[in-house]
Image (spheres, rainbow, N blue to C red):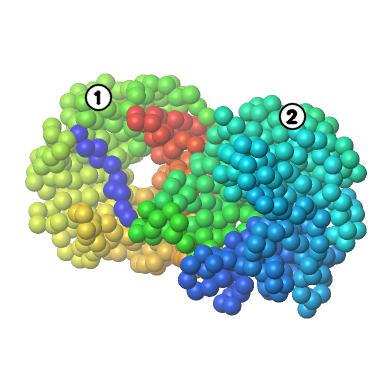
Amino acid sequence: MRRALRPIVAGLVMLPLVACSGEQEDCCSPDPNDVPRVLTANVERVLPADGSPLIPGPGDERLELAAATSAGGEVVAVGRRRDAGDQSEAALLRSADGREWTATYLPGPVAGGTLAAVAPAGDDVLAFGNDADGAPVAVRVTADAAEPAEPVELPLPATEDGDRPARVRAAVTTGDRVVLAAVSVEGGDDPQNASAVLHVLASEDDGATWTALELPDELRVVGTGPAMLEQATPGEIGLAAYDGAPVLSVGLPGADGVVTTLWRGDEAGAEWTSLGTAADLFEGEALDLLHGHGDTLLAFTRAGTDASAWRSDDGGGTFARVDAGPAAFGGGGRQIVDAAVTLESGVLVVAGRTEGEVFNGRRPSALELWVTDDLETWRRSLDDPELAGGGRQQTAGLAAVGDEVVVVGSDQRRPADDEAEVAAAPLATHGASWIVVIADGPAEPPVEVTPLEVTGFAAGATVTRVVAAADGLIAAGSTSTGDDHDVPAVWTSPDGVAWTPVEAPALQDVTGTIEGLTVTEDGGVVAVGQVTGPDPDDDADDRLGVWTSPDGAEWARVDLTDLVYAGAVGYSVTQAGDAIVAVGTSEPEGRGYRDVGIWRSTDLGATWAAVPTAEEPFRAQEIEVLFGVGVRLDGTIVAVGHTGEPLQSPGGGYSYSPQAYALESADGQTWETVPAPFDGADFAELYLAQRIGDDFLVAGTAGLPLDLPNEDDTVSTSGAARADGDGDDWAVSEQRFRSRPVVRAAVPSTTAGTVVVGEWWRGGAGQDPLIAVEREGALFPVDGDLLDERETAAVGAAELGEQVVVLGMDTTDDAPAVVGWSLAFP
């Protein structure tokens, strides 16, 4: 049987949040001086102007930045530019603050190659790479912006027949020395005896002269034989500075994947000590990055799709996993750490990315930032709108400039549908920079979120609503019969943990589902949804479903056989004075798309009448859907949902971009539209209409267009709007998010504020539960520790004693599972 789920629509759904009017407890803001403060990162996305060297051209030209650093109060970034025909040249950009950039002239031999690494050398910056013929090169960038880059001689070995020149792989400044690592191939004309050789150079005079360091054979040879020759750049080489000495990571291909070994040199570079393999040091996890942080050597690794941080306080002899919490480096998608910098204040800033599923042949990625000042408490910029982007973002390096950190990287556009099968198709790639300012921000609201081991839900059960009743909680939805059919279902619980399915013929004698649920003033319960026919592939017998109960335990079904109820689905229901009003969708004869459905009962749900919806204000759009209904303080009924104009798809079917839709009525019979604030292009699906104290909350999801240099994208707003008691004054917050919040339910008047629940849609990382406190129009998420790789959403919440119980759905596996959380307010 077809499950009567909320319709899925095409287009990004969007909506803003609101400022609170009135003096209710849930709206009150605490004194700013009393709000706990925590370390946070304030991010500014730099949007380069036309003509900026960050933009390599008007088409699919690419600026691929590989590294960045700072010295003398200036940021230097290096890489290469490539045109659409794959011709390339080296790129060296400089900036005083990460906002305005200039390109630096490079001498001829360098200009035709690529630059791969940078390191500060006093007030100068040394940039390293290879020229057009593959020979290693270096240039000095002085503090005088008018001066061109000066070539620097590197004593790397000359090539002979069959050899490959040394390719620069990494550079770092440690203490008073600059250290450079490069790999050459020797004996390439004899594949069986060819070898890849690591070279490490050091300079103690800011690059004026260099010394080749002696390396043990186990470190010096990083590959042999024909398989090594097939690699464009043999070995994976990492280089970090720690306690005045270099630390190397060398990854070599093995039968079971890359085997990475860590080596630490002494301050003179004369002695090298093997620290062991990454597999041994990090419990089999792959190494992404090494970073020296004061007296601690840090390693960032990956196990599957989640990253981890490790610390060593004995120079790399042993490492211990940093307990950063379950969600700091986890969540949907694949987390990778790319760069780190330690500020003079001791604050550590880490940058990386979350990679999503392959889209049109390419894997998108979103920038990630973490900050910590003690290696124990990590703050992740999970939803900062300044990190929004739709293609592939990747960090090249971090540079500290005064009390700011400049994140330098690349931003690649999304591939189009016709580029999906062309893996080598050039995609416009721009340079990108973000400015990060470390500050103290407000702590999360004092809410303790504890997972509940809920019981009583059979496999395949689906919960859609939760309400508080006299003796506890009632949840409603459906259960699967195992033969492609669902039946309406109700559960009760005294504590939010142990749930008991209600056995009632009125529920089990039909197929269908419950979508909306309300408790009446006399303690009765009314549920709405859909009753479906016996054939899951034929909706001819589908109709509106209504059930009533005096107490949540005994249920009766209202048999609605009139043609006006055919194809209808009830999504929400509420009591409005002496009437019960339900809203949803209907399928009147002659209409090709979804139409509004509104139904009234004046006898507590025993009998029903359909409200006429064929005339104004209805049918202004081809598609009109209502998902939520509530009653304001002045008795006005408000119903919300969305409208749309269908676009036919070439392969059949249709899609549409939803626009927010709100109606109001004095009696549930005669309706008119509510224009503001829902007539803006940034509003879309609305799911919730509920009185909050003297105010009225409307919520769903919303967003705003975001004009980025490489392509347009969107940022999301808070997904809610508040009105005063008579609905005359709506307020919308300026809050923005990178991820898209979807608000589906609310619980007013907790000590922390109004609790709202729903789901986050995270680009490339799937769906996570949203649990937040709404105060004066802003959302304060308290769900950070719930971030994981599973597809989970919160669907309903209700107050139970001094806690709020939230139920959700985990849809990761074939059979959905009900999950739960308890919210306490210390």
Q: At 64% from the left edge and 68% from the top edge, which residue is drawn? A: 112
Judge by depth and name the residue closer to the eye, 15 or 723: 15
Judge by depth and name the residue closer to the eye, 704 or 474: 704
In the figure, is residue 469 to the left or right of 209? left
Residue 416 is at least partly visible in this image: yes
Q: Amino acid at mark 1?
A: Gly
In the figure, is residue 282 to the left or right of 549? right
Question: Taking 557 as reference, is 197 above or below it?
Answer: below
**Which x, y percent locates residue 456?**
38, 21
Judge by depth and name the residue closer to the eye, 601 or 55: 55
**Which x, y percent locates residue 35?**
69, 49
**Which x, y percent locates residue 169?**
70, 51
Label 1 sits on residue: 482
Label 2 sits on residue: 276
Q: Quadrant of the C terminus?
A: top right
Question: Taking 313 as reference, is 269 above or below it?
Answer: below
**Which x, y percent locates residue 170?**
72, 51
The picture quadrant where one finds residue 752 is: top right
